[in-house]
Every structure is written in C-alpha cells, then in structure tokens.
Amino acid sequence: MTQVNAPYPTLEPLQRKRLIARRHSVTYCYDFPGVFENALREIWAERAAAGELASLLPAGPLAEVK
C-alpha cells in the first residue's frame, strides 16, 4: 500500500511524450505499430465473421515474412 504522504512518481521520458501527444489529440509515433495491428485484427475479424475463407485471424503477433 502506498503511503498518503509519499511523493507522486515522476513520468519517464516516453510517458511524458505520450502525455503531450494525447493532450494535442494525436498519437505518439511509437504507438502506431500497435494501433495499426489492432486495426488489421478488427478488419480480419469482421471478414472472418462474414465468412471469407481466406481471412483467418493470426494467432500470434504480426510479423513480416520474407
């Protein structure tokens, strides 16, 4: 349990940059891969629910295969 009179922990540099971006209603650049992956998973799930055979949702994280 945290004491009431304990100082509030300071933000790390990355957290500070994310907070600044959020205050300006934008997404921090390092968050785009996760946002992009979530959007793709939603599209795949919608297509799989619609019955498209070629749209199986990947089980693990998305990765480039060469």
Image (spheres, grey):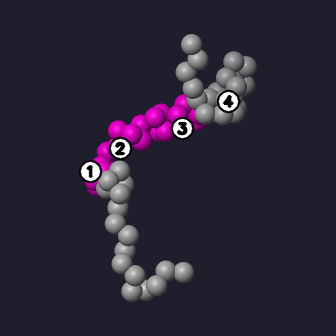
**Kind of residue at badge 1:** His
Q: Is residue 4 left or right of residue 56?
A: left
Residue at horizontal 42%, vertical 41%? 31
First in residue order: circle 1 vs circle 4: 1
Q: Is residue 36 above or below residue 6?
A: above
* Image quadrant containing the C terminus: top right
Secondary structure found at label 1: loop
Instruction: Give the x, y percent position of residue 34.
Output: 49, 39
Magenta region includes residue 23? yes
In terms of secondary structure, where does tag 4 sit? loop
Separation of disc 3 and disc 4 at Cα? 12 Å
Residue 57, label in figure: 4
> Left or right: 49 with respect to 61?
right
Find residue 22 and report its horizontal and vertical position in percent.
33, 52
For disc 2, the marked residue is 27
Q: Distance of mark 2 from mark 1, alpha carbons? A: 9 Å
Look at mark 3 in the image and give the residue it sits on. 38
**Circle 4: residue type:** Leu
State the SS at label 2: loop
Neighbours of disc 3 within 10 Å: few (<14), some (14-19), many (20+): few
Classify mark 1: residues with Cα within 10 Å, few (<14), some (14-19) or many (20+): few
Q: Which residues are magenta?
A: 17-42
* Upstream in sequence: badge 3 or badge 2: 2
Q: Specify the amino acid type for callout 2.
A: Thr
- Where residue 64 sits, quadrant-wise, is top right
- Asked if residue 46 shows in the view, the reply is no
Residue 1 percent location from the top left of the image: 54, 81
Residues 62 and 66: in front is 66
Q: Residues within 10 Å of mark 4 (few under 14, many from 20)?
A: some
